[in-house]
Image (cartoon, rainbow, N blue to C red):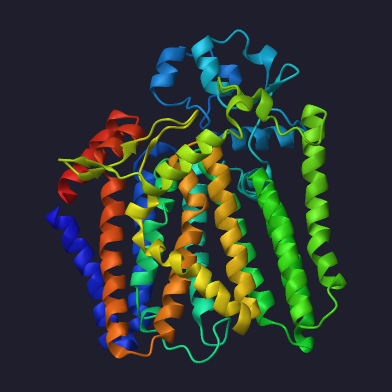
Amino acid sequence: SVNLLIVILLLTFFYLTAEFLPKYGKIFALTAVLTIFCFYLFISANFFHENNFFPSKTSYICPITKLQYNWKNTCEKGYFTSCYNYYNILADSLTKKNLFLFRYKDLKDIHPVLRSYLVQDTTFYKEKFYLYFGITPVLLFYLPFHLVTGLYLTDKFLVFILSCISFLLSIFLIRRCCSHNFLCSGSCTLPLLRSSNPLIFLLVGLCGWLPFLIIRSSIYESAIITAHVLLLASFAVFCYRLSFCRSRQSAVSDISVFLLGLFLSLAVGARPHYVLFIPIFLAAIVWINISENKKCLKQILCFLIPCAVIGCILALYNYFRFDSIFNFGWQNQMNGLNQKSYILNFSDFWTGITNNLFKFPDRDLNTIFALAKTHGHSVGNEWTAGIFWTCPIIIFLVFLPKILKETYKKDIKFFIFLSVMTCVIIINMTVTSFVGMVNRYFAEYLPFMIILSLIIFFKILNETKNRGTKILLNILFISIFFYSVFMNTALLFSKANALYYVLSDENFYTYTKFIKNLF
């Protein structure tokens, strides 16, 4: 524990030295970014089937023609992992002009246990097994990578790369929203927001729950991080649209709106419920044009054309698989659950909200904190901890109503931006609370909560005139940083989390050795 505290103190030292040595600010910022990247690489490449990290010439699932291997030894060696690298199998199928993963007749003679590994969480329809998850990751990453390089892109490697991109996009949004020439009115001198301050980078990178996606990367995490990055990219181009509002820059504005529709529609191909964000952003675009006294028909078309094209592709993808454009395959999902029995169950929603927000982690004498096993939900009662305990910076969201009221009167663009991000948080938190208390679902809304809470914090700091209050706010921020990094690191390497995520003896040895050295 002492070693961990020393590490966090050294990270805090970045902030102090960056303030006194501004000319070295970019070096400190770059060091913070590289620290996050290295940490992501470490947990991704060393745990949970660490041999399946880098791209390879094989798909990491034994070809069906070689299933004469003893099924028990094959499973124990980790070659067959449920829900693992299905995207590569689909990529292979697409090159053969097929949309299915396996035919039933190809698997019917395989041992039932091995077959269960092969088809876990797929969709069974008309004697064929299909991929339940969205096709966007395949079209954007897996298939192009395989066609260009001849190698197979692993889930772990993709989640690592996209998590790094997510981290950078989050930093961009925070800095862009709090800069003096965008959204915030008036001059903006924010000492914590200068490029010389790495605390923001470290808080966003370590406390946004992305490490929990990275440490156990599989097909679920690939779908979530793909949609998450596309949604962050949507907010990035939305910022561009808010910036370029003068008539001579209308072409750039139209392109940004087109990209906004493209990114959002592609995100739907990874997470179907993201379709709810399309009307929200469309309403925002219309509102912005009205506030600028501009005709909005052109930008509406720029937004809807990519949505319509991608929507038709997704609809046809569903129709060719399941004979219906509205059938996503969840009714026939091979996971042993009656999907209709728990979807839209209000008691599950309330259980998920209360646990995901307020669940205090168990104490662990060996590792300070341990993730607590939740219970009461119909599905997905995993090891988790409430986000109010893991990232207390989000307490600044209590000022959101006040900020919205003020910005509605003073800066309508800022109001629209904050409102859209608030809607995204509410929708993702609501949907994921209905379908289970699962660690990976935190990454769908917690990063946006951190972004929004930091924007609010910096706006409050900027508008505070009293020097003593500013000092107290800075002390509060450093305290929150110190606590949040410590809590998230302790949870990530806690005993409960290790037992849940580590599957092999070699991984467990590496894992426990690291814990002993750290604590």
- How many circles with numbers are drawn on the protein? 0
Q: Residue at x 35, y 48 (%)?
A: 43
Q: Nearer the viewer, residue 122 or 43?
A: 122
**Rendering quarter of residue 322:** top right
- The vertical placement of 508 against 450, above or below, is above
Q: Which of 371 and 468 is in front in this view?
A: 468
Q: Residue at x 39, y 20 (%)?
A: 76
**Rendering quarter of residue 241:** bottom right
Q: Residue at x 50, y 73 (%)?
A: 402
Percent of width and height locating residue 325 = 81, 36
Q: Is residue 40 left or right of residue 498?
A: right
Q: Nearer the viewer, residue 77 or 226?
A: 226
- The vertical placement of 68 against 246, above or below, is above
Tell me, yes or no, if residue 380 can be seen here.
yes
Q: Which residue is at the far left?
A: 2
Q: In this view, does 171 lie to the left or right of 280?
A: left
Percent of width and height locating residue 449 = 48, 60
Percent of width and height locating residue 496 = 28, 36
Percent of width and height locating residue 89 = 62, 32
Q: In this view, does 99 lie to the left or right of 447?
A: right
- The vertical placement of 412 against 9, above or below, is below
Tell me, yes or no, if residue 143 can be seen here.
no
**Rendering quarter of residue 283:** bottom right
- The vertical placement of 168 against 15, above or below, is above
Q: Which residue is drawn at 68% across and 48% down?
A: 268
